[in-house]
Amino acid sequence: MDSTPAVQTLDLTRLYGEMVAVHQLNLTVNRADLFGFIGSNGAGKTTTLRILATFLAPSAGTARVLGHDVVKDADAVRHVIGYMPDFFGVYKDMEVTEYLDFFGACYRIPARQREKTVGDVLELVGLTEKRGAIIGALSRGMQQRLGLARVLIHDPQVLLLDEPASGLDPRARIEMMAILQELQRLGKTILISSHILSELQTLCNRVAIIEKGKLIYSGPVQGVRDQMARGRVVWVKVSSDAQAACELLKARPEVAEVTTVDGSLKVTLADHDTDHSIVADVLVHGGARLLELREDELGLEEVFLRVTRGETQ
């Protein structure tokens, strides 16, 4: 299997006059990744995606998609990517199949093949029953799915999706995320920017966090959680004397702090590398009767708030 990264940038920089939109960005997205691109509005996400989609030229540095330089090999890049901007226009008076057939023709898919291709992408995004509908009569969620179908019409290997769930209701967002998981299962590489961090947390295998055009973190989702989980928290319930349990834990160097919250003990560990089973060992050997022990799961939203300052351009 080809080991060339799906997307790779080296010191990628984009200036708008005096303003630095993207600053020396070094990013690697591996093949078949479902990669989350996270940042506040104005952090540089859309600029980066537009450079990768060949709509913007970098001011400095390089970017490659499947080994093709986005400046020198722009045509080759356009054949292997599908780009879905955060806001895209649709021809509201056209039928769904008409719209997709038009874009299939733009990609020079032979007429005899287009009908099957259009049917396949409609099935993939769950719009088969709407094939004859007028686009203007579709809901926002269905129009988003149609936009994704249009992106898929030429069977690209890499998908660049800028806020694909923007403005969707909860059910439509869940359906969109399920479609993206299916596309990853089919071998597509997906780079998705989103503000819905709770969904990226379970959807993506890797993420990058960008702020003020600079990369703050890139790697596995669990990696950024571990990096930020200094002083992680364990919740404990005991059926014995809670105050005695509190004192047992406070005497241990592995424990930074113990407080009582609504009848439970909130135990803050001193170091991320400490196994939280130490809490159970201390309590049981100290004679406490343990009812419950659970560790706080640090969510992606909390991680994002900790590692960023809310800075934009």
Image (cartoon, helix red, strand yellow):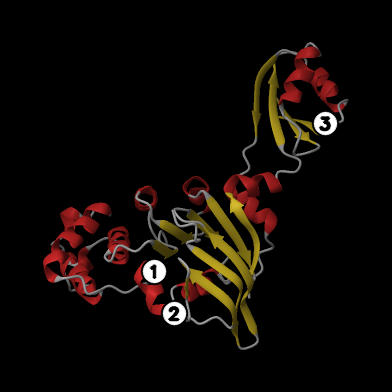
What residue sits right under mark 3 in the picture?
254
- Nearer the observer, disc 3 or disc 2? 2
Residue plotted at (18% across, 70% down): 101
| Badge 2 amino acid | Phe
| Badge 3 amino acid | Glu
Q: Earlier in the sequence, mark 1 or mark 3?
A: 1
Residue extending farthest front: 1
Q: CA distance from mark 3 to mark 2?
A: 53 Å
| Badge 1 amino acid | Tyr
Q: Which mark is residue 83?
A: 1
Residue extending farthest top: 287
Residue 45 screen position, x and y as percent: 54, 68
Q: Is residue 34 left or right of residue 283?
A: left
Q: Is residue 112 above or below residue 291?
A: below
- Nearer the observer, disc 1 or disc 3? 1
Q: State whether residue 262 appears in this view.
A: no
Q: CA distance from mark 1 to mark 3?
A: 49 Å
Residue extending farthest bottom: 17
Q: Is residue 276 above or below residue 158?
A: above
Q: State whether residue 179 appears in this view.
A: yes
Q: CA distance from mark 2 to mark 1?
A: 10 Å
Residue 168 screen position, x and y as percent: 38, 58
What residue sits right under mark 2 in the picture?
55
The reply to whether dot 1 and dot 3 touch (C-beta < 8 Å) is: no
Residue plotted at (42% across, 78% down): 74
Residue plotted at (62% across, 70% down): 25
